[in-house]
Image: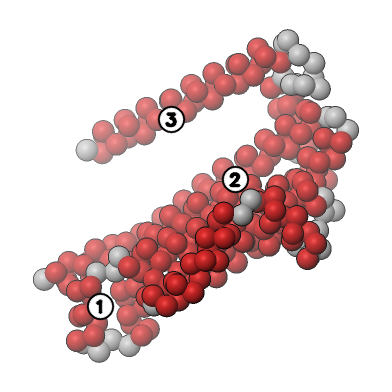
Amino acid sequence: MTGFTLSARSRRFAVVLLSSAALIALWGIASLFVSDIILPSPRRVIGEFAAFLSRPQFYLALQATVRRGIEGFLLSLLIGGVLGIAAGGIPAVEALFRPLLSVVKATPVMSIILLAFIWFRSGTVPVFAGFLMAFPVVTQNVMIGVREVPNQLLEMARIYRFSFRQRFFHIILPSITPFLLSGARSALGLTWKVVVAAEVLTVPRHGIGSSMQFAQINLDTTQVLAWTLAAILLSAASELLFDLLAGLLQPYKRRRRLHAHSGAV
């Protein structure tokens, strides 16, 4: 079974590698027929990105975007998690917040950013926009997780007179952890996109999006794509780190299975 899993992963990796190589090859061929302003070659873009690594301005921009992304993500995780637990356990809370969640999900990202630009400073707009667009994802996933808590475990907790702390940490939290992780991973990817888009529109002093906007004004397509590459790598690295940290929560999943087994017995 393990051999099959490794083989399947190897095949997926090979497919991703081949498709990426094909995409870069098509990009390189297309760049031969147009000017660098329209589409620079992959070699020029990668070379420009490599040059970024020796410039202090790159790290200032990266640090600013990372800080805003983490702030927006943690806010969405905290508020979305609390609201999801409350809405999943109390129907009245869900009914109260459902219109708000529906409106936020239906509102275009650019509208959120432009309105936030009226309300806040340019450096705060990416944090607010990232939070507002990501927290409904976390809320709904946690809400579903609360509803999936096995009734027999809750009944067992009532019979043995578990305190709220015991019910939360030994039953509710292990049960909602997979749903929370799924929602958090989706929210993380969304947060980076919204934060960079907000930086492009609001142009704070430092940020990946701000640098992209300055490059676009100067018609420097090579730099625009190099900054885009930086944003892509940032998102990929954060998701990889998130998956590694999520692996530390495996004991919660095992505890959930043990609780479910003991409850069934």
Residue at position x 78%, y 48% in the image: 201
Q: Which-is-in-front pick, marks 2 and 3?
A: 2
Residue drawn at x 61%, y 54% as measured from the top left: 107
Q: Which mark is residue 154?
A: 1
Q: Residues within 10 Å of mark 1 (few under 14, many from 20)?
A: some
Q: Which of the two marks, 1 or 3, is nearer to us in this view?
A: 1
Residue 151: image quadrant is: bottom left
Mark 1 → mark 3, Cα distance in angstroms: 42 Å
Amino acid type assigned to the residue bearing label 3 in the image: Phe
Q: Is residue 94 visible?
A: yes
Distance between the alpha carbons at the discs numbered 2 and 3:
18 Å
Residue type, label 2: Ser
Circle 1: residue type: Leu
Few, some or many residues within 10 Å of mark 3 (<14, 14–19, 20+): few
Query: Which of 24 and 110 lies nearest the eye of the viewer?
Result: 110
SS type, badge 2: helix
Residue 90 drawn above or below residue 34: below
Number of the label disc, if any, that sits on residue 235: 2
Q: Position of residue 257 (x, y in %)?
A: 24, 63
Dot label at residue 13: 3
